[in-house]
């Protein structure tokens, strides 16, 4: 069901097309890790707002191609209906449908739930008011979350925050270069990792083991590539205020 407030579409399109370049600000493997993190963030904030998680429902391919220009407005309408649903089950279904649309609009790299949960009083009040007011407010929240994540993905900012994290963990300063490379250029072999850190085999292996312990890198096996990860304990440094 499409929102009747189609005049809001220009603001939606500006949000949608401004979101797309964010996926080019880091390596695809980094963006994939970030999407996993955002899913956890979404569930955290839906728990705060509604007392339950809200997993997005998959949008079929036809809906993506035909209705892409209206998906954010549709998600706003679905959430509005969820707030007025007769049963908890109905509300969860509607919220799941809304999050499926939002996941497509946001490319999975910013969280509408985070934005809504920052203003719980307004969230309730707007949902009790006219649908038009809710939709306008909702799109403003989406714009704010997109802007926040654009700041968080800024390459210079990421490096500066990594430096602070490395210092706080007592890791050698060369760690920042290695982590930043993983963030921007993607997974590397163990030999490449040691070269990036400027360390010999023993020192490189030791640093790799410490990063694994802190959850800042991950590797499927001893022979697999090393890639960056985003542990919950590091979010205050890497993505301040995300949670």
Image (cartoon, grey):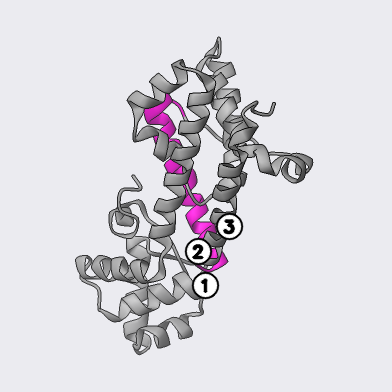
Q: Secondary structure at mark 1?
A: loop
Q: Secondary structure at mark 3?
A: helix
- Is 10 on the left-hand or right-hand side of 142? right
92 w.r.t. 84: above or below: below
- Most foreground residue, 208 or 55: 55
Camera-near label (3 vs 2) is 3
Q: Residue at x 65, y 26 (%)?
A: 4
174 w.r.t. 221: above or below: below
Pointers 1 and 2 in contact (C-beta within 8 Å): yes
Residue extent of the magenta highlight: 26-52
Residue matched to label 3? 20
Query: Which of the numbered marks, if any, corresponds to residue 24?
Result: none
10 Å crowding of disc 3: few (<14), some (14-19), many (20+): some
Camera-near label (1 vs 3) is 3
Whether residue 74 is visible to the viewer of this picture, yes or no, is: yes
Residue matched to label 1? 186
Residue matched to label 2? 30
Quadrant occupied by the N terminus: top right
217 w.r.t. 97: above or below: below
Pointers 3 and 2 in contact (C-beta within 8 Å): no
Q: Residue at x 33, y 44 (%)?
A: 243
10 Å crowding of disc 2: few (<14), some (14-19), many (20+): many
Distance (Cα) linking label 1 and label 3: 19 Å
- Is 171 on the left-hand or right-hand side of 27? left
Q: Secondary structure at mark 2?
A: helix
């Amino acid at each position: 069901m499409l929102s009747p407030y189609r005049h809001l579409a220009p603001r939606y399109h500006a949000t949608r097309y401004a979101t797309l370049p964010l996926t080019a600000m880091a390596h695809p493997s980094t963006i994939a890790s970030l999407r996993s993190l955002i899913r956890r963030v979404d569930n955290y904030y839906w728990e705060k707002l509604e007392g339950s998680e809200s997993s997005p429902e998959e949008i079929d391919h036809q809906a993506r191609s035909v209705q892409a220009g209206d998906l954010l407005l549709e998600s706003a309408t679905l959430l509005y209906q969820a707030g007025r649903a007769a049963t908890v089950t109905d509300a969860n279904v509607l919220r799941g449908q809304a999050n499926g649309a939002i996941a497509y609009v946001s490319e999975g790299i910013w969280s509408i739930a985070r934005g809504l949960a920052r203003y719980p009083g307004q969230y309730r009040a707007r949902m009790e008011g006219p649908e038009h007011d809710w939709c306008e407010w909702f799109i403003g929240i989406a714009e704010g979350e997109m802007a926040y994540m654009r700041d968080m993905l800024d390459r210079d900012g990421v490096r500066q925050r990594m430096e602070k994290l490395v210092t706080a963990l007592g890791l050698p300063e060369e760690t920042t270069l290695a982590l930043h490379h993983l963030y921007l250029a993607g997974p590397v072999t163990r030999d490449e990792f040691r070269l990036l850190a400027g360390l010999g085999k023993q020192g490189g292996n030791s640093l790799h083991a410490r990063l694994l312990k802190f959850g800042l890198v991950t590797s499927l096996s001893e022979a697999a590539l090393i890639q960056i990860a985003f542990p919950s304990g590091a979010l205050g440094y890497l993505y301040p205020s995300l949670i």
